[in-house]
Structure formats: C-alpha cells, structure tokens
Image (cartoon, rainbow, N blue to C red):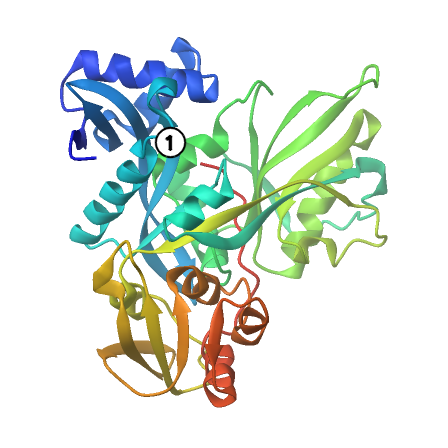
C-alpha cells in the first residue's frame, strides 16, 4: 500500500470535512454530532489515510491512562475507525492501524485499547479481548436498602476537580478502569438525550466516601414513570455503597428501573437484599501491547508475590516486541530485561489477556493462547493475579 500516506488533519478544513463524511457514514454521525465529537476529542487527535490527496480512512484517539495493578499505564484509546466504502477490502484499515500503533510506540505509549466493531479485524492487528462492560437493570422498588449512614451533598457533575480524586481512589483498586482525561469526563456527563445529569457526593465534610451521577428518561411502556441511568457510581466503603443505593431507592414512587454498568461479578450487587438485577447489553473491550517492555514495567503486580517470569513473544506487526523477555517482580513492581530461558510462549494477543487479568495463564493455555511449563504458568498466574478487568466508560 505504498500509495497511501498517513498523518493528521493539521489545519485543513477540507481534510476535516472529508474525514467527517467517512466517519459520519460509518457510524451514522450527523453534522451536528460530528461538531460536538470533534470538539470533544480535539482535531489534533484524529489520524487519517490519504490516497492521491483524498482521505480514504480515519480514526480518533483519546490520550489517557488505564489502571492495572494499582498503576495508571498510558494508553491510546482508539475510537471511530472508519474507511471509505470505495476503499474497503484493500488494506486501508490495516495500514491505518499499523501506522497509529507505530506512532504510539514512537511516542512512548505502551498500550492501546478500544471497543471493537469487528473483533476479528483487531485480532489480526494484535489486539485481544481483555475486559468487560456489562449493563445491569433492576426495578427501583427492588433495591430494598434504606440506610443513610453518611451525609449526601449536591455536587455539580461538571466539577471534575471534586470527582477526580474520589474516582482515582476507586479506579486504582480495580483493573481496566480508565484514568480519564477531560474528554472522557465530558462523555460521562453528556446528556445523551436523557436531560439533566444529577450529582451527589456521600460522606462527611472533608472526607468524601463516594459519589453517584445519574440522569432520567421516560420508562418504556410505563405511563408517568421514568428510568434512572447511572453514569458513575463510586463507593469507597460499605456505608457509601448503602447510602448511594438508598438515594437511588428514593426514586421508587415514580421511578421504574435503574440501569448501571459493572463487571461480570459486580461488587455493587453484593449488599442488595435480593438477586433481582438482570444483565443485558454487554461489550468486551480489547487491548493491544504496543511496547512489551514499557507495558510490563508500567503496571503494578501482586504485592504478595515476588519472582521471575520469562516470555517469548511473537509480534509480526511490531517486531521490536518479538523475542524473549524476563520480568522480575519485587514489592509489586516489575523490571524487564532482554533474554532468558524457558518460560511462556505467546503472541501479543495472549499477553494482552494475561496483562489485563481477563484470563490467567492456565486458562490461556487451555485456549491455545499460551504454551509453557507448569512452573512458568504458576508464576505468571501469581504475578498477574488481581480483580476482574472492566470499565464503566465507552469511547
């Protein structure tokens, strides 16, 4: 594909319009929505492929972080990958992804994350399914918690300086949650056709223990009733969790259902008196190891284990990642050196699953994504042990 050129939009109005036309058709984005989306993500964060001076494909990227092992690892979150219909099936999409991954590596970004419109395409480009986003629903009348042990205070949902430190305390103890940039925070509080977004912090003055952001929409087929859509639910302790559930339960006089996002084993449901929640819409996000050394050294590890894991990695797209690497873990931190003997053999897809904690090494061996001796498999299981990877955000 030597006739293709890769780059940004620069200050070109015509390149922006051509990109908007392609992505608009690919994702049913209206002109009005494009103006909001491009302003949110920033025109400097779009990348395009051109042929003969004409845009034939493009994407947007979010420069942010993602929490693994208690550490925020820099990522490029890829969004809205679209190819001109006349150019599809000719390698444009693969060339676009190869170039953006190369650029990310050169800029020192060790990971890339995305929600796939087609899983197989991104697998061919080195990504693998690495975490969950699951939508749960429940009748508000079934919440069954009325415990307000903590104070409830109004907060402006746009006051990110108040919400960020509370969110970060929770996100750091999870796997896969985003270290949100301003664009992602703006997505959290965007209207989405549900009208006003309400925000409440729970806790004592000066000691916040959690918060909830939610909006409302008319309930389907239920007259004079509404659904509550939780945008963000952070509870740093059990009292905060019960207080927020109670706040949501207060809507039972007119509220029909409450909807929220969580992992497959959702800790927020543990305190509910009955198993009434149902799971519906589900989408798994994918992860790509862009820089093996940078990624392995940036995340945290099981603080209760120290030892060594050796990897032989295969990566035809980014050959600098290929070869044998030794990871030494001490006090929850890892250092990586070139070389080593034995250990695990895996592609970047298998490493992405292991890295996020989506599957442990033993499971990945059963899936054919990892091979190795039992001692190495047990060591990898212990090193990467942690909570289920998930995120509440969509991008």
Regarding residue 15, the answer to whether it shows in the image is yes
Q: Position of residue 234 (x, y in %)?
A: 56, 49
Where disc 1 sits, the SS reads: strand
Question: Residue 77 falls in which quadrant of the image?
Answer: top left
Whether residue 48 sits left or right of residue 360 in the image: it is left
Total labels: the figure holds: 1
Q: Residue at x 36, y 48 (%)?
A: 125
Q: Residue at x 54, y 69 (%)?
A: 364
Q: Residue at x 53, y 54 (%)?
A: 131
Position of residue 35 measured from the top left corner of the image (x, y, whole percent): 34, 15
Question: Circle 1: is it few (<14), some (14-19), or many (20+) Cα within 10 Å?
Answer: many
Tell me: residue 276, above or below residue 231. below
Q: Which residue is mark 1?
A: 81
Question: Is 381 situated left or right of 1 in this image?
Answer: right
Which residue is nearer to you in this view: 165 or 362? 362
Whether residue 35 can be seen here: no
Q: Quadrant of residue 55?
A: top left
Residue 165 as seen in the image, left or right of residue 130: left
The N terminus sits in image quarter = top left
- Pinpoint residue 295: horizontal percent, then vertical percent: 31, 63
- The residue located at (41%, 78%) in the rendering is 344
Up-down: is 204 above or below 41?
A: below
Vertical placement of residue 235 versus 58, above or below:
below
Q: Position of residue 331 (x, y in %)?
A: 37, 83
Quadrant of the drawing holding the C terminus: top left
Q: Is residue 62 left or right of residue 104?
A: right
The front one of 249 and 183 is: 183
In this rendered view, identify the residue nearer to me: 144 or 334.
334
């Amino acid at each position: 594909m030597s006739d293709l050129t890769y780059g940004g939009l620069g200050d070109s109005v015509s390149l922006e319009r051509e990109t908007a036309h392609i992505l608009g058709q690919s994702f049913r984005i209206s002109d009005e929505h494009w103006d909001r989306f491009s302003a949110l993500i920033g025109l400097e964060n779009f990348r395009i492929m051109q042929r003969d001076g004409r845009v034939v494909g493009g994407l947007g990227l979010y420069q942010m972080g993602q929490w693994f092992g208690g550490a925020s690892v820099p990522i490029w979150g890829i969004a809205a990958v679209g190819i001109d219909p006349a150019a599809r099936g000719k390698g444009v999409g693969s060339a676009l992804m190869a170039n953006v991954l190369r650029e990310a590596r050169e800029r020192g970004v060790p990971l890339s994350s995305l929600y796939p419109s087609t899983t197989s395409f991104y697998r061919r480009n080195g990504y693998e399914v690495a975490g969950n986003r699951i939508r749960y629903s429940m009748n508000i009348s079934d919440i069954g918690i009325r415990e307000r042990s903590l104070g409830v205070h109004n907060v402006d949902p746009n006051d990110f300086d108040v919400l960020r430190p509370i969110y970060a305390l929770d996100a750091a103890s999870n796997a896969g949650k985003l270290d949100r940039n301003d664009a992602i925070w703006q997505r959290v509080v965007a209207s989405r056709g549900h009208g006003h977004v309400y925000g409440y912090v729970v806790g004592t003055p000066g000691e916040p223990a959690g918060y909830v952001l939610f909006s409302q929409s008319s309930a389907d087929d239920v007259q004079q009733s509404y659904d509550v859509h939780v945008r963000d639910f952070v509870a740093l302790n059990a009292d905060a969790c019960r207080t927020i559930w109670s706040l949501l339960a207060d809507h039972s006089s007119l509220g029909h259902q409450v909807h929220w996002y969580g992992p497959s084993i959702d800790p927020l449901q543990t305190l509910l008196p009955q198993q009434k929640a149902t799971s519906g819409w589900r989408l798994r996000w994918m992860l790509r190891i862009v820089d093996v050394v940078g990624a392995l050294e940036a995340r945290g590890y099981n603080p209760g284990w120290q030892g060594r894991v050796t990897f032989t990695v295969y990566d035809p797209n980014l050959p600098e990642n290929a070869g044998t690497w030794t990871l030494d873990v001490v006090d929850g931190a890892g250092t990586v050196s070139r070389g080593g003997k034995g250990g695990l053999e895996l592609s970047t897809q298998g490493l992405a699953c292991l890295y996020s904690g989506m599957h442990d090494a033993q499971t990945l061996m059963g899936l054919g994504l990892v091979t190795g001796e039992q001692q190495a498999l047990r060591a990898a299981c212990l090193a990467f042990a942690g909570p289920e990877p998930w995120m509440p955000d969509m991008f």
